[in-house]
Amino acid sequence: MFRYVRYSFIIILFCLASCQQVLEPKPVNLLVDELVLNEPNDVEPVRIGMYSALRGTAAPTVIAGDFTADHIQHNGTFTDYRELGTKQITAANAAVGLLWQSLFRTIYVANFMLEKLPDVAGVREARRKEILAEARFIRGYANFIGTNTFGDFPLVTTTVQATNRTIGRSPKAQVLASVLADFQAALTDLPNVEAGSTNALTNAAYINKVSCRAMLARYYLYQRNWAQAEQLATQVISSGVYTLQTSFADVIVKDFNNESIIEVGYSVTDDPQTSTSLFPNGLSLNNLLVGRREVIPSNQLVVSLVSAEAGTRRQTISFSTQNLRGNDNGWTVEKYGLALEDNNNIALIRLAEMHLIRAEARAQQGRLTGANGAVADLNVLRTRAKAPAIALTAQAEVLLAVERERIYELAFEGHRWYDLVRTGRAQVVMSSFSPNWNSRFELWPIPQSEIQQNPTIRTQQNPGY
């Protein structure tokens, strides 16, 4: 798995002086021999390398979360996307390999920082703790995505290549325990950010205590620990650091808006919409969704998003008669623009998700109505979207309403497939969507390239692949 990072890493300097400016220097070797991270001046480039690696996981996770599920239909010619669109996924799918590769690149850089930074003299202790906390969070995030995508997942805690080249898969429960430990350790030492802070760019681009709590809220939701999920989501909402945009359109057209809790930023030179090296078949995300239209919003999703129930969230997609030809339904995803546009970033977490997490957690605990009930949180988002308020009183109906709201609010942000799997709804929903759906698709396969090169994993492929 570490053949991609065996000798070097590209460190991309991510300058937060402007949300439009991200500098990309020449590749810098990250050899595991203390030649790079051995003095204070080395720390910041490696730190930015961690964020760059995290950024590399964002688009592949959107592909996993939305393309595996019922949000897209295939409309082009490439096999990788046909497999995702027609639900005939194979271990050779390049998108599968891309996510695997990006996750382990992220874990590698985080481990590098965790191993080397404690021994670098001359770094202020408070700063050292903050950066190590960032590394713990970023490693935990990558493992969270990895184990929820692939199931049992290699738990890599070292940069020793001889160990990593033959490491096997660890049980999902063990990986998740490691994720929780990383998040909790990070929470202790991450910097705080106060309510009323107006620097939306800094608040979203770098991890802080509030954004760590947001990720913990998602973690506990997936673990069905409803009380903890509700508590942490409430802490994030009540912090006042992040606020819902008045107009849902701003979520689509503005990078680093006020409700982005964690967002990864790009420039013209490294934007996944323009960089052909980041995607299977040389395609970029924007070209995939807009230019070549390899995949398009599914007819089922279109019906949901253009309904009155979605309100202004119909702006997630747009229609053009010029695209109507063959099987093309004419609809296009609007959430990710070109590099020169102000919506080329990817939000990993935003405040709307916290309301949805709290609504689901409260509904699961039987608290449905009133100021502290699930319906109140749903109506906060519906009011923002100018959709009619709902007044439901049955738990099953409220939980289905939460599922629908997550479609309206979070479409093409990488959640749908993960939501269906974690709620046990994948088989029911997806079998009615596609005759090719099989329960094995509740996990992605281990990439065929990894099966071939790692002798330990060779016999550990997910069932059915």
Image (tube, rainbow, N blue to C red):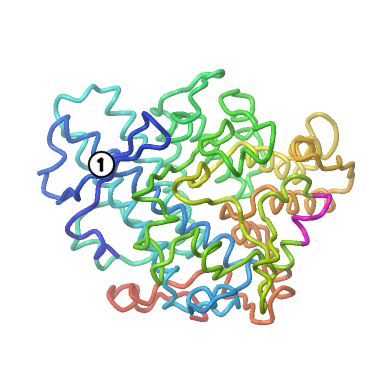
In front: 75, or 431?
75
Q: From the top left corner, tell me how far across and down residue 221 is, in percent.
A: 62, 46
Q: Is residue 359 magenta?
A: no
Is 152 situated above or below 202? Answer: below
Q: Quadrant of residue 352?
A: top right
**Which residue is painted at 86% across and 42% down in the image?**
388
Q: From the top left corner, tell me how far across and down residue 355 is, in percent.
A: 68, 38
**Which residue is painted at 70% across and 70% down in the image?**
329
**Which residue is painted at 27% across and 75% down in the image?**
453
In front: 395, or 205?
205
Q: From the top left corner, tell me how far across and down residue 58 is, in percent.
A: 46, 52
Residue position marked by numbered label 1 in the rendering: 113
Residue positioned most to the front: 322
Q: Considering the numbered disc 1 on the image, is that residue within a helix, a strand or a loop?
A: helix
**Which residue is painted at 59% across and 30% down in the image?**
236
Q: Quadrant of residue 382?
A: top right
- Magenta stretch in the rendered image: 303-309
Q: Quadrant of residue 360?
A: top right
In front: 14, or 326?
326
Label 1: how many residues lie within 10 Å, few (<14), some (14-19) or many (20+)? many
Q: Amino acid at mark 1?
A: Met
Is 235 situated above or below 251? Answer: above
Is 253 situated above or below 419? Answer: above
Is 350 situated above or below 419? Answer: above
